[in-house]
């Protein structure tokens, strides 16, 4: 068997081993829409919002970036606050409870999986605070693909952190992929 045939057979196994349950949950050629459909089915109690509908939200809407600090450092939506994908409801409320009370909050990550999981976890406590929460459909990948403005510490940027090479395939402008700010 040739080396290239061995590599072709071994690569899917290596990907699966490297990403555990994260990568195989979505097919290699799935669109962001197809990924979002799966996310909606997995988190049926989470409300989702398209980027175009954000204009109808109150001016004091809060944005939460549910990615790791290195992803946030590369780029994020202006005014967004970085929050750990693994934060507990109690920790979230201790950190943001007073600020979020009675407001609208939009959560996003790379494609919407981590942010939907967090909104689902926060659902009860946000409701008690009178907060309306949404997951941003397609998250920062769709935002970037739609050429919407992104920022980092230095100002406006076209760069976006892909989370991993597997997920970078969902970015239209791969030349703008960056792991460093």
Image: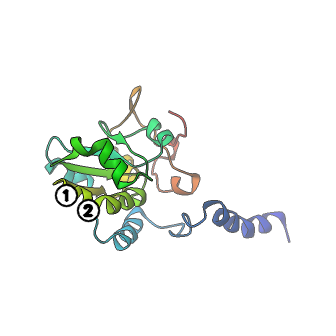
Residue under numbered circle 1 = 128
Tell me how far mark 2 sits from mark 1, CA to CA: 6 Å
Q: Is residue 32 left or right of residue 128?
A: right
Q: Is residue 16 left or right of residue 119?
A: right
Residue closest to the far right: 1
For residue 124, which numbered disc appears in the image? 2
Q: Is 123 located above or below residue 51 in the figure?
A: below
Q: Is residue 126 left or right of residue 29?
A: left
Q: Quadrant of residue 155?
A: top left
The percent position of residue 5, horizontal first and vertical second, equals: 78, 68
Q: Circle 2: is it few (<14), some (14-19), or many (20+) Cα within 10 Å?
A: few
Instruction: Report whether residue 75 is seen.
Output: yes
Q: Quadrant of the N terminus?
A: bottom right
SS for tag 1?
helix
> Residue 5 or 76: which is nearer the viewer?
76
Q: Circle 1: is it few (<14), some (14-19), or many (20+) Cα within 10 Å?
A: few
Q: Is 108 located above or below residue 123 in the figure?
A: above
């Amino acid at each position: 068997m040739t080396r290239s045939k061995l590599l072709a057979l071994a690569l899917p196994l290596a990907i699966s081993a490297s990403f555990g349950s994260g990568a195989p949950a979505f097919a290699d050629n799935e669109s962001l829409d197809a990924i979002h459909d799966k996310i909606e089915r997995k988190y049926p109690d989470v409300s989702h919002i398209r980027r175009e509908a954000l204009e109808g939200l109150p001016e004091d809407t809060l944005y939460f970036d549910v990615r790791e600090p290195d992803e946030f450092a590369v780029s994020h939506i202006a005014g967004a606050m970085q929050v750990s994908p693994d934060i507990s409801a109690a920790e979230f409320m201790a950190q943001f409870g007073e600020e979020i009370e009675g407001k609208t909050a939009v959560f996003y990550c790379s494609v919407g999986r981590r942010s939907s999981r967090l909104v689902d976890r926060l659902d009860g406590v946000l409701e008690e605070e009178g907060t309306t929460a949404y997951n941003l459909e397609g998250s920062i990948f769709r935002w970037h693909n739609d050429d919407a403005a992104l920022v980092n510490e230095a100002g406006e940027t076209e760069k976006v952190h892909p989370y991993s090479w597997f997920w970078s395939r969902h970015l239209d402008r791969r030349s703008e992929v960056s792991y460093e700010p």
